[in-house]
Amino acid sequence: METKYDWESNIKMNILTLRALGLWPKGDTTYKPGLYMLHAAILLTVLLLGHLFFQAVNIYFIRTNLEAVTGTIYVLLVEMIVVFKVNYLVRNMGMVKQLLSILKTDMFQPKNSEQIGAIHTSLWFWRIIYNILLYSCIGTNMFWAIYPLMDRSAREEKRLPFLAWYPFDTSKSPAYEITYIYQVISVCTITTLHVNIDALVAALNVFNGSQFDILCDNLRNLHKLGGSIAANFLICVKHHKEILSFSDRFNKFLNWILFIQFFIFTFCIGMTLFQLTVVAPMSSEFYSLVAYGLAITTQIFMYCWFGNEIEVKSSKIPYATFECDWTSFSLDVKKMLLFFTLRAQKPVKLSALNLFYLSLETFLRILKTSYSYFALLQQVNADK
């Protein structure tokens, strides 16, 4: 192909959003002292750390009220993950941009329209999951924002969307209105960070899996790539090594994000199910919990699905090698094919600190564990 495939064009909107929020310096560089770093520091301190601080302090004052704590902690924990993700992304910005740069090299480029079609098929499903996550988060924020305005008792008490402590009386105007707007803007910022960081990671998973699609197609068509078959095969072997290196570096970036997010989200799904049993059915608070539960479940599914795709696609390499017209190859090439097939038997599995793998089986285990937390909370509540 004469023109290079632009991998980053598929995640252009995510990158622009992260750049606006201070999490994506221009070019291939990391953070440098300047206006952009100052913009990022102010924005994240005021809207992210400030909002979490006031909610965390409030937990101390309501610590003896189980219902109030459970109604707050599941939201606070998920918001705290954003602090970890932001810090981790900032510290590893050079690695992430380097991974995107590797995709621009000739070795990682699709060679024909069929390979581009396979990439777009994977990206089509990525966009579907991304949109489900995006709109469920929008719905959650909308219900959180309007609940105090629609509930009569909440309006009379001048209740805020989120329980939080402030060093001033929020029941008086204009402090109430200013704090209300501050909370809504803060949670929208936090949600936007959550969605776009996860979407970026999922897209990198798609790009990683697409490399195995490209490699398998090249192996099937060794005799159609032009040039000598031996040379074409050696290029495929080198490509395979580069993909494994890419996967390993990407997995190192994912390790702690996966571990922290899966551990906390498992607990939060159970807490959300419990909250659904104690709020008024069909109320705005009920719908906000439904949307919230869908959002965090989709986030976990996004990681597990595309991690599982990498495992499935990498396991197809030996079969793709066998599907080429190997019977007409020379004896030396046949020996190389056999050796490569044996070496490629082990599929690539992304993991969280080697404790669990990204797979659909892991996703189901998370849901089962979440239900166990829900059952435990229900039992504790019933025994009160």
Image (tube, helix red, strand yellow):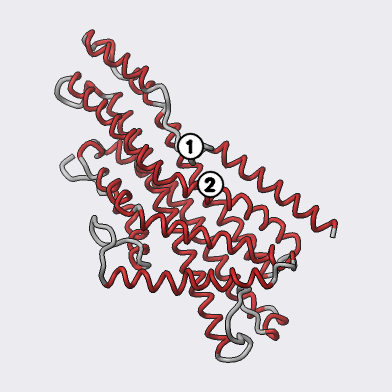
Expressed as whole percent of the image width and height from the top left, the position of residue 149 reads: 63, 80
- Which residue of the protein is positioned furthest toward the bottom in this rendering? 173
Q: Nearer the viewer, residue 328 or 52?
A: 52
Looking at the rendered structure, the secondary structure element under dot 2 is helix
Q: Nearer the viewer, residue 73 or 294?
A: 73
Q: Does 341 sit left or right of 107 as displayed?
A: right
Q: Is residue 138 above or below residue 355?
A: below
Q: Which residue is mark 1?
A: 308
- Residue type indicated by callout 2: Phe
Q: Which residue is mark 2?
A: 301
Q: Is residue 354 above or below residue 40?
A: above
- Which residue of the protein is positioned furthest toward the right in this rendering? 383
Picture mark count = 2
- Residue type indicated by callout 1: Asn
In the figure, residue 25 lies in which quadrant?
Answer: bottom left
* Dot 1 or dot 2, earlier in sequence: 2
In the figure, residue 247 lies in which quadrant?
Answer: top left
Q: Is residue 189 above or below residue 368?
A: below
Q: Is residue 19 above or below residue 100?
A: below
Q: Nearer the viewer, residue 110 or 235?
A: 235
**Circle number at residue 289:** none
Expressed as whole percent of the image width and height from the top left, the position of residue 342 reads: 37, 17
Expressed as whole percent of the image width and height from the top left, the position of residue 335 reads: 27, 11
Circle 2: is it few (<14), some (14-19), or many (20+) Cα within 10 Å? many
Looking at the rendered structure, the secondary structure element under dot 1 is helix
Quadrant of the drawing holding the C terminus: bottom right
Circle 1: is it few (<14), some (14-19), or many (20+) Cα within 10 Å? many
CA gap, disc 1 and disc 2: 10 Å
In the figure, residue 43 lies in which quadrant?
Answer: bottom left
Quadrant of the drawing holding the N terminus: top left
Expressed as whole percent of the image width and height from the top left, the position of residue 360 reads: 55, 38
Please report the residue visible at 48 percent of the width from the left and 51 percent of the height from the top: 129
